[in-house]
């Protein structure tokens, strides 16, 4: 499902043509062109050409031997990397689609995270992290392992800027690695959120990152200016007093939903969160302001009422296209 932004008349959402055959785990637009990649629990990776109106056309498809957990693009936006429960990362060159995908990385357990970074020497490296508690760097020019870091626990989420890399692990630890010393964890903190980390995404315009957790809360962290750190509640629904079974008649309660995805608008610096309640909310993280919330009904063009116990289909992943005018 795609929506257009930055236009006077925002058009209704458009569904993908020939969508994935099973539940989607992750989606990601190319950073240089309107090609959308999807990974799913059917072990498939699909690519779609998307026009300026959000209409799609299937472009290519390849398969892993187990569900796909993460996607990453090369900086050129022409090579896609997919991480899977089959313990491998596959590489797919969209300009040589006939050659299919090829393995470029492996772990001893499912790989949950992957991204690309550019080193000081100008070379591009693939970074992977997985349930074997390892973070690995791969030299793409030789397809060999370049470095490895012990994370201490399973990696759940990862993101990077051109300055640092952040990894969230199963024990609620958050590891910060500066890319000038990529084999050393510079700083480790306990997540400021009390429950399991679900997603971490870095701000595109400043040295900060956002953490989303299963408790319907987001924390904004400034690793070099900790006095600016803060957190806020989101993806929650108030329950009328006394209507929650097993609670006193005077007590108020909430349905609390996990924050599954965070996506930044790279031009404006604002971001959206998507939750298991089937809603998307836009935020200004610097001004600490809620900008706009889209209900499940709005996201489905009026075809669904988001009322308990019937909530919208969970939002598992969100991404903006290269010019920040289309969100999927």
Image (cartoon, rainbow, N blue to C red):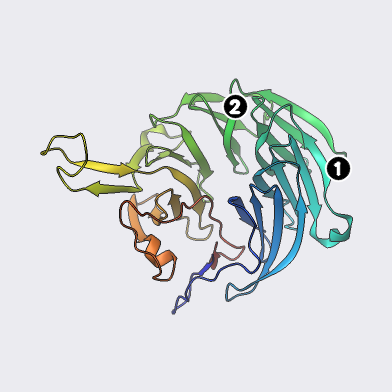
Between 124 and 291, the residue placed more toward the observer is 291
**Residue 214: image location, x then y, percent:** 42, 38
Which quadrant: the N terminus?
bottom right
Between 160 and 49, the residue placed more toward the observer is 49
- Label 2 packing within 10 angstroms: few (<14), some (14-19), many (20+): many
In this rendering, the answer to whether 227 lies above or below 140 is above
- Label 1 packing within 10 angstroms: few (<14), some (14-19), many (20+): few
The dot on residue 231 is none
Between 250 and 262, the residue placed more toward the observer is 250
- Left or right, residue 272 beside residue 101: left
State whether residue 184 appears in this view.
yes
State whether residue 122 appears in this view.
no
Q: Quadrant of residue 324?
A: bottom right
Which quadrant: the C terminus?
bottom right
In this rendering, the answer to whether 16 lies above or below 121 is below
Task: Determine the residue located farthest toward the left in the rendered image.
Answer: 250
Q: CA distance from mark 1 to mark 2?
A: 28 Å
In this rendering, the answer to whether 153 lies above or below 254 is above
Front disc: 1 or 2:
2
Among numbered discs 1 and 2, the one appearing first in the sequence: 1
Residue tagged 2: 154
Residue tagged 1: 141
- Left or right, residue 277 beside residue 238: right
In this rendering, the answer to whether 186 lies above or below 143 is above
């Amino acid at each position: 499902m795609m929506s257009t932004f930055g236009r006077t008349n925002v058009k209704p959402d458009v569904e993908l043509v020939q969508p994935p055959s099973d539940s989607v785990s992750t989606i990601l637009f190319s950073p240089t062109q309107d090609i959308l990649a999807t990974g799913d629990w059917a072990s498939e990776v699909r690519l779609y050409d998307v026009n300026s109106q959000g209409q799609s056309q299937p472009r290519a498809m390849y398969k892993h031997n187990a569900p796909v957990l993460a996607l990453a693009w090369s900086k050129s936006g022409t090579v896609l990397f997919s991480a899977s429960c089959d313990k491998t990362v596959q590489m797919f060159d969209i300009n040589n689609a006939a050659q299919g995908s090829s393995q470029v990385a492996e772990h001893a357990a499912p790989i949950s995270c992957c991204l690309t970074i550019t080193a000081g020497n100008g070379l591009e490296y693939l970074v992977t992290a997985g349930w074997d508690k390892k973070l690995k760097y791969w030299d793409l020019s030789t397809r060999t392992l370049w470095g490895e870091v012990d994370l201490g626990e399973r990696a759940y989420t990862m993101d990077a800027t051109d300055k640092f890399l952040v990894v969230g692990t199963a024990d609620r630890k958050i590891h910060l690695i500066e890319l000038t010393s990529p084999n050393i964890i510079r700083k480790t903190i306990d997540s400021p959120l009390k429950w399991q980390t679900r997603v971490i995404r870095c701000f595109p315009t400043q040295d900060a990152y956002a953490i989303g957790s299963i408790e319907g809360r987001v924390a904004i962290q400034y690793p070099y200016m900790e006095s600016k750190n803060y957190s806020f509640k989101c993806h929650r629904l108030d329950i009328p007093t006394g209507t929650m079974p097993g609670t006193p008649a005077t007590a108020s309660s909430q349905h609390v939903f996990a924050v599954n995805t965070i996506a930044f608008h790279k031009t404006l610096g604002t971001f959206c969160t998507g939750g298991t309640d089937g809603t998307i909310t836009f935020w200004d993280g610097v001004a600490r302001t809620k900008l706009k919330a889209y209900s499940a009904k709005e996201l489905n063009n009026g075809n669904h009422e988001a009322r308990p116990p019937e909530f919208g289909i969970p939002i598992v992943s969100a991404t903006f296209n290269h010019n920040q005018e289309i969100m999927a």
